[in-house]
Image: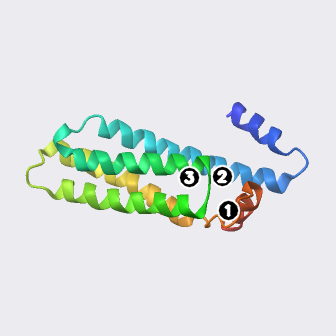
Amino acid sequence: MRATSAQLAALSTDDPEFQATATSWMFTVLDVGHAVLELREQLATIPKVWNDAEDACQSVVDGIALLFDSPTAAHLAAARGAVDQAVSVVREAARSKRAPREAHTKFERMSGYLHFMRVTLAELPTPVHTDAPEWLQAFLARR
């Protein structure tokens, strides 16, 4: 937490509103990042026979990384689309009669992480500006 505070202070010591925006954004990134880590942990434990679920979830991880690295409208749309696709694939895997019971539990957990990401990404404003501070201001305005 101290490292996060130091990063915020380095961003803009003269603009408390921008610091509040950046704080909100950082917590969003941390929350989604945690969900990504949990999703990857679940992926590591499912049998390789579920390649479709693994591929769909990896697309989510890649899309979110790209969005957080470079927030653009196209990257946000791609991340949202990847999450929607992964939700469908994981839902189908969970409903499959060939999935053992422990796999159903893992797919349910994965589905929960994906739904959290879906809701969080749906709440983000579309980054219409390439200027990160302007997008962060739009992000804060939604709160």
Kind of residue at disc 3: Leu
Where, by quadrant of the figure, is residue 10 drawn? Answer: top right
- In the rendered image, which residue does mark 2 sit on? 25
Spot occupied by residue 23 in the image (x, y as percentages of width and height)? 71, 49
Q: From mark 2 to mark 3, how far is it between C-alphas?
A: 13 Å
Q: Quick one: label 1 or label 2, which is nearer the N terminus?
A: 2
Measuring 12% from the left and 48% from the top, which residue is drawn there? 99
Measuring 64% from the left and 64% from the top, which residue is drawn there? 127
Spot occupied by residue 14 in the image (x, y as percentages of width and height)? 91, 48
Q: Does residue 47 appear anywhere in the picture?
A: no
Furthest-right residue in this view: 14
Spot occupied by residue 41 in the image (x, y as percentages of width and height)? 35, 36
Where, by quadrant of the figure, is residue 102 drawn? Answer: top left
Q: Answer with left or right where residue 133 lies relative to residue 79.
A: right
Q: Which secondary structure lies at badge 2?
A: helix
Furthest-top residue in this view: 3
Q: Are marks 1 and 2 in contact (CB under 8 Å)?
A: yes
Residue 131's label in the rendered image is none
Residue 67's label in the rendered image is 3
Measuring 67% from the left and 53% from the top, which residue is drawn there? 24
Kind of residue at disc 2: Trp
Q: Quick one: label 2 or label 3, which is nearer the N terminus?
A: 2
Is disc 1 surrounded by few (<14), some (14 to 19) or many (20+) residues within 10 Å?
A: some
Residue 139's label in the rendered image is 1
Q: Which secondary structure lies at badge 1?
A: helix
Q: From mark 1 to mark 2, how far is it between C-alphas?
A: 7 Å
Q: Which secondary structure lies at badge 3?
A: helix
Give the position of the N terminus as an image quadrant.
top right
Where, by quadrant of the figure, is residue 140 drawn? Answer: bottom right
Question: From what the image shows, is residue 115 above or below residue 128?
Answer: above
Nearer the observer, 70 or 43: 70
